[in-house]
Image (spheres, helix red, strand yellow):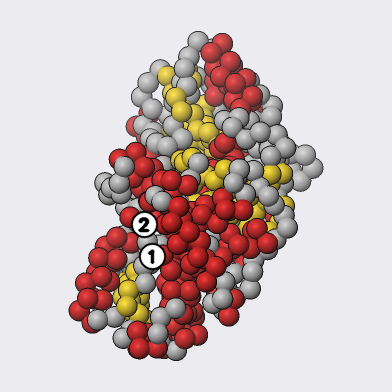
């Protein structure tokens, strides 16, 4: 790419400054405490903009630059959500009609905001399951109706509008920054930021961050031209783009200093960091920039004392997604890990292994069902640091076994607990509540290990002060089962006890768990 082309984008950003602030104000920068980092970290709060994301900048700039005659032909666009809101806001402000194509799977919060913002000036058409399918339909319609197409990223005017974000960074007085991390979907924001920031701070390093199953820009850079991905993960729906833009690729391939690939778990961990450090709740794609920086920290690629900027690019997320995010997130500088560990069958063997875990490691999930084997394979969900996991690996090695990391296995993610119900001769299933404090779960298991053999355990940390688990225990006789139940029922205590409440499951639940009716109390 020539210097002339760089200058062309730079000039468009300059011109955009004359337009975008008719619609919204500059968003702030603020420092962020990132656990485990020795850098001076700042975030750019695009979640505080007019549509809770940066996309209003490019959409309004491109539409405001049109003549009245062009706008009267009608605006057409396609978007996974945030660009659509920007177009809706611009259409309402400029008093022009817009037809917006969106994937059918677009979160309702984004669809609802488009309707609310654009009101009678916008029409939403839901087509396909991906942005690319919606975009193709929008292009066809635009050609048929003779409207003006506003591309969400691969357009110089749109990129110019996004570049005002970079101008605010320079004008904030918080720089210069040594490193800047920005999420990449189509690449429009990354292209504009690179062009503008490198003009003022030639030594700045800019890193594009992509999901490992969304890495269309990385694929384009490796191929030497934009290519289509066979599969695109949509957990971070705001960056779920199958093919990088031709224009954005041309800029990013020349100006970006490196690409970082992050997992969905990495993103969830960064959302938690933003919440715990600054009470910010971004959408998944809004936390990708920080996830890229935190990955570089974990890999030792960020030097102590460097000044770092991460763009919080948006906060438009369905409330229901928070549960999945919390389940995947780590705590502080600690990360989530799921292990399938071989344990010899027998009374107390699982408890004995759990008691050997490093004290600093927290159990956030336990999935166990007795199978027809001399060796059982419970799944442990853990939160720990790198050193604590090293200590855990040593404990496992000393046992002469090898545990398998199953953090990305489907059965673990969907909590499918396999067990051999036919092996249950006289089972007891109870729901227990216990204080969600360090050691309370293991305390309960220690108290019952001499009374029964565990045959089922289903527990997941929920973030509440009370933990809940469904526990199955196996007995040889009905008399032993009743004795154990009496002992457990006497355990609940509010004064340091391991259980707050306990109740036996219903007859219907027992039948579903075991495939047979519960024995009568008289045996």
Left or right of 45? Residue 247 is: left
Residue 421: quadrant of the picture: top left
Q: Nearer the viewer, residue 41 or 511?
A: 41
Image marks 2 and 1: residues in contact by CB distance under 8 Å:
yes
Residue 155: quadrant of the picture: bottom left
Residue at x 29% of width, y 66% of height: 134
Residue at x 56% of width, y 76% of height: 18
In this rendering, the answer to whether 18 lies above or below 253 is: below
Q: Nearer the viewer, residue 220 or 260?
A: 220
Q: Which residue is mark 2?
A: 247
The local crowd at label 2, few if under 14, some if 14 to 19, many if 20 or more residues have their Cα within 10 Å, is some
Q: Residue furthest right?
A: 495
Q: Position of residue 258 (x, y in %)?
A: 49, 40
Left or right of 407? Residue 351 is: right
Left or right of 213? Residue 384 is: right
In this rendering, the answer to whether 303 lies above or below 468 is: above
Q: Position of residue 389 (x, y in %)?
A: 59, 25
Is residue 521 visible to the viewer in this orientation of the structure? no
What is the secondary structure assignment of the residue under circle 2? Answer: helix
């Amino acid at each position: 790419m020539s210097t002339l082309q760089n200058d062309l984008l730079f000039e468009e950003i300059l011109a955009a400054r004359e337009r975008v602030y008719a619609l919204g104000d500059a968003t702030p920068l603020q420092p962020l405490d990132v656990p485990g980092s020795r850098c001076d970290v700042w975030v750019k709060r695009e979640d505080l903009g007019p549509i809770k994301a940066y996309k209003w900048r490019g959409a309004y700039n491109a539409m405001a630059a049109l003549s009245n005659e062009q706008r009267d032909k009608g605006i057409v666009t396609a978007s996974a959500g945030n660009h659509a809101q920007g177009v809706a806001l611009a259409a309402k402000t400029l008093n022009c009609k817009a037809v917006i194509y969106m994937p059918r799977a677009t979160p309702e919060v984004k669809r609802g905001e488009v309707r609310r913002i654009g009101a009678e000036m916008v029409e939403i058409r839901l087509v396909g399951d991906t942005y690319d399918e919606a975009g193709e339909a929008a292009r066809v319609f635009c050609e048929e109706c003779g409207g003006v197409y506003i591309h969400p990223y691969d357009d110089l005017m749109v990129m110019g509008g996004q570049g005002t974000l970079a101008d605010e960074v320079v004008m904030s007085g918080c720089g210069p920054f040594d490193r800047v991390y920005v999420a990449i979907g189509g690449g429009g924001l990354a292209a504009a930021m690179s062009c503008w920031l490198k003009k003022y701070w030639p030594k700045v390093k800019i890193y594009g961050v992509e999901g490992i199953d969304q890495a269309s820009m990385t694929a384009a850079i490796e191929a030497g031209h934009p290519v289509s991905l066979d599969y695109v993960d949509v957990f971070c729906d705001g960056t779920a783009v199958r093919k990088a833009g031709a224009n954005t690729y041309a800029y990013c391939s020349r100006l970006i200093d490196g690409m970082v690939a992050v997992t969905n778990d990495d993103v969830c961990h960064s959302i938690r960091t933003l919440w715990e450090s600054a009470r910010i709740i971004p959408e998944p794609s809004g936390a990708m920039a920080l996830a890229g920086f935190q990955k570089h920290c974990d890999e030792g690629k960020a030097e102590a004392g460097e000044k770092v900027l991460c763009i919080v690019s948006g906060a438009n997320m369905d409330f229901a997604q928070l549960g999945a995010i919390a389940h995947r997130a780590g705590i502080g500088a600690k990360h989530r890990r799921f292990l399938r560990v071989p344990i010899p069958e027998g009374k107390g063997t699982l408890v004995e292994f759990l008691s050997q875990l490093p004290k600093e490691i927290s159990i956030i999930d336990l999935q166990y069902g007795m199978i027809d084997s001399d060796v059982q394979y419970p799944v442990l969900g853990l939160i720990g640091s790198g050193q604590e996991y090293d200590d855990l690996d040593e404990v496992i090695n000393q046992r002469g076994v090898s545990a398998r990391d199953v953090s990305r296995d489907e059965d673990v993610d969907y909590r499918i607990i396999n067990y051999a119900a036919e092996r249950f001769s006289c089972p007891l299933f109870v729901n227990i509540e216990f204080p969600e404090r360090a050691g309370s779960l293991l305390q309960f298991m220690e108290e019952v290990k001499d009374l029964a053999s565990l045959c089922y355990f289903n527990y997941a940390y929920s973030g509440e002060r009370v933990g809940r688990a469904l526990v199955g225990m196996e007995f040889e006789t009905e008399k032993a089962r009743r004795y154990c139940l009496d002992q457990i029922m006497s355990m609940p205590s509010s004064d340091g006890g391991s259980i707050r409440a306990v109740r036996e499951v219903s007859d219907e639940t027992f039948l579903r768990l075991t495939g047979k009716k519960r024995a009568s109390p008289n045996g």
